[in-house]
Image (cartoon, rainbow, N blue to C red):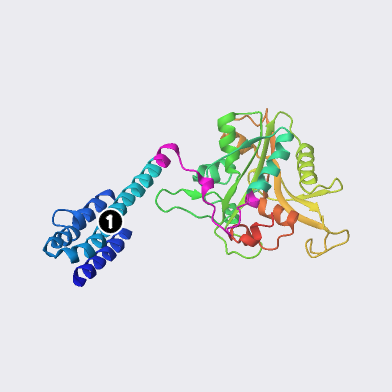
Amino acid sequence: MRELIDKAKVIALELKQAAEKVVTIKEVDDLRVQFMGREGCLTLLIKELKDLDSLAKREVGPVLNQIRVDATEIFRRLKEDIEKREAEAANMREKGFDVSAYQPKGRPDGTRHIYSKFIEDIEDIFMSMGFSIFDGPEVETDFYNFQALNIPQNHPARDMQDTFWFEKDKKLLRTHTSNVQIHAMQKYGVPIAGVCTGRVYRYEATDATHDCMFTQCEGLLVDKNVSISQLLGTVKKFLQRLFDSKKLKIRVRPGFFPFVEPGLEVDMSCVFCKDGCSVCKKTTWIELMGAGLVHPNVLRAVKVDPEVYSGFAFGVGIERLAMLRYGIDDIRLFHSGRVKFLQQF
Ligand code: PHE
């Protein structure tokens, strides 16, 4: 008699443990057969009751019955839980997933990258002056990056911009955004006024002020009777607004870029000091960008008559501008992915 009660308790315990592991309706059904089917261990145990005398029956009977009632309840609840969970999952799949329902704790919010914000500021300034926004490819052909810009094959000016070449198809990673001048004039014709901001690549060693990948902003305006004073006025207005300083001055020096004639180097007055500091290397001027009047050969490359049209172009490094505006001292920070750096903006 005791033996029967002990066996029943072991079966009850086994059932409880097994019930914790089931996940599908089929597993519940299998478990039910294993315990309460015709040959189930609990069924067989209950059958043994009839061999007991009536006194023992009265004692063991209620214990076994209770285990049977409990087991039935366990199976009912298991089925109910699984059906509910499956219905919820199906509902979620059908109606879409509520992303706000799960919020991992302690994970900081993301912010927009300083590039995106800064480039937008720059584009806003140029758009307010009537310039369009252009885009162009970073993987480029020799024609757009060099030849159409008056840099023929084997021209020594190619050494100014060490280039990453693709071995297979002789394409290259653009070394400047000036390629977009050509694409834009081919696509939209002249007159034209636009700026393009984008990544450029140079096969160079990196240090705090040089990176092999950086960002440039290119400006192009072609129309009848375009003059250097228009170029200088545009560049000055742009810099004054970007650095929020009406007092900001610019000066130009002769510079060489094959795609402009005359070519200019534009410097701006130091925004940090009046009589020399470490940023302007005690000169009160900061070297900033290349510029000039579009070379007639560039206009010819896109079938524009240089006797009728003229234009200006300029190119400036975005990181250099951002470093000056925000006082950043290492260009490599921009794409270092350092959260502490990025969170400041
Ligand atoms: N493309 C030149 C550079 O990368 C900059 C430039 C653009 C100069 C347009 C003149 C006119 O250095």
Q: Nearer the viewer, residue 80 or 239?
A: 80
Asked whether residue 262 appears in the rendered view, the answer is: no
Tag 1 residue:
71
Q: Is 224 part of what is drawn in magenta?
A: no
Q: Nearer the viewer, residue 269 or 243?
A: 243
* Relative image position of residue 160 (x, y in whole percent): 60, 55
Ligand 1 is within 8 Å of the C-beta of the residue at disc 1: no
73 to the left or right of 164? left
* Relative image position of residue 159 (x, y in whole percent): 57, 56
Q: Is residue 319 above or below residue 125?
A: below
Answer with the quarter of the image where residue 286 lies: bottom right
Residue at left offset 14%, top offset 65%: 53
In the displayed image of the protein, which residue is found farthest to the front? 55
**On-image quarter of the N terminus:** bottom left
- For label 1, the crowd category at 10 Å Cα-Cα, with few meaning under 14, some 14 to 19 and many 20 or more, is many
* Relative image position of residue 110 (x, y in whole percent): 60, 53
The part of the chain drawn in magenta is 91-115
Residue at left offset 16%, top offset 63%: 54
Residue at left offset 17%, top offset 62%: 45
Q: Is residue 268 above or below residue 149?
A: below
